[in-house]
Image (cartoon, rainbow, N blue to C red):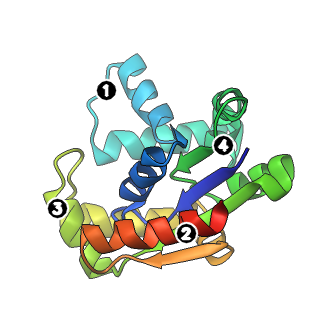
């Protein structure tokens, strides 16, 4: 079985790419679900401030590989019967944990979009929209506090997502054809 992690900055198109993988039979594990579950458990409203607080608390408690570590049972269970796509690998430590654990089964696909493109998408997305200021603040936090650049730099594949959704799907299917 294969494990493919999708990396990229917020608004780059990771979830859209993961959706194409799902259409091709991959089971999706979204690391951000952990944040959503914690928000629900604590009765907090889903917004950028609360989400950031949860992310920082979890990393303080479990280390910088927190999200991957907490998702291992779900990943392992899914890999027993399916290829798996991880939507949203965040840190270098998560990358190294998964690389060491899964070795050759593990690949990384980076989705890149310019800040202007990402910020425009984030302002208009239906779920969890971000203002320009929130998007810029999140970018800074992800780079400075999450070690997000390493997995993007070490990706096995990169898709530039500056065009249409159809083009993104076409490029994702090209990567899928290489992985088969």
Circle 2 or circle 4, nearest the eye: 2
Which of disc 2 and disc 1 is earlier in sequence? 1
The span from disc 3 to disc 1 (Cα, nearest Å) is 22 Å
Q: Which residue is mark 4?
A: 68
Residue 8 percent across, percent down from the top left: 48, 66
Circle 3 or circle 1, nearest the eye: 3
Which of disc 3 and disc 2 is earlier in sequence? 3
Q: Which residue is mark 2?
A: 175
User: Which residue occupies 38% across, 71% down?
Assistant: 170
Q: Which residue is mark 3?
A: 123
Q: Looking at the rendering, which quadrant does residue 169 occupy?
A: bottom left
Q: Looking at the rendering, which quadrant does residue 39 occupy?
A: top left
User: Which residue occupies 84% across, 55% down?
Assistant: 103
Q: Nearer the viewer, residue 169 or 119?
A: 169
Task: Tell me the crowding category of disc 4: few under 14, some 14 to 19, or many 20 or more residues within 10 angstroms, Cα based.
Answer: many
Residue 141 percent across, percent down from the top left: 46, 63
Q: Kindly check if marks 1 and 2 are in contact, taking CB atoms under 8 A apart as contact.
A: no
Q: Looking at the rendering, which quadrant does residue 175 occupy?
A: bottom right
The span from disc 3 to disc 4 (Cα, nearest Å) is 28 Å
Task: Tell me the crowding category of disc 1: few under 14, some 14 to 19, or many 20 or more residues within 10 angstroms, Cα based.
Answer: few
Q: Which residue is mark 1?
A: 44
Q: Evaluate whether residue 82 shows in this view.
A: yes
Q: Quadrant of the C terminus?
A: bottom right
Residue 25 percent across, percent down from the top left: 52, 42
């Amino acid at each position: 079985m294969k494990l493919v992690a999708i990396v990229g900055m917020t608004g780059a198109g990771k979830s859209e790419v993961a959706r194409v993988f799902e259409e091709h039979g991959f089971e999706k594990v979204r690391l951000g679900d952990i944040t959503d579950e914690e928000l629900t458990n604590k009765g907090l409203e889903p917004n950028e401030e609360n989400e950031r607080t949860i992310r920082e608390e979890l990393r303080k408690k479990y280390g910088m590989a927190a999200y991957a570590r907490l998702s291992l049972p779900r990943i392992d269970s899914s890999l027993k019967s399916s290829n798996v796509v991880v939507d949203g690998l965040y840190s270098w430590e998560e990358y190294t944990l998964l690389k060491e654990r899964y070795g050759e089964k593990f690949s990384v696909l980076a989705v890149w979009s310019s800040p202007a493109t990402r910020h425009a998408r984030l302002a208009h997305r239906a779920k969890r929209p971000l203002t320009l200021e929130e998007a810029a603040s999140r970018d800074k936090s992800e780079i400075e506090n999450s070690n997000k650049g390493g997995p993007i730099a070490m990706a096995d594949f990169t898709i530039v997502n500056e065009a249409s959704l159809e083009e993104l799907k076409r490029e994702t299917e090209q990567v899928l054809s290489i992985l088969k």
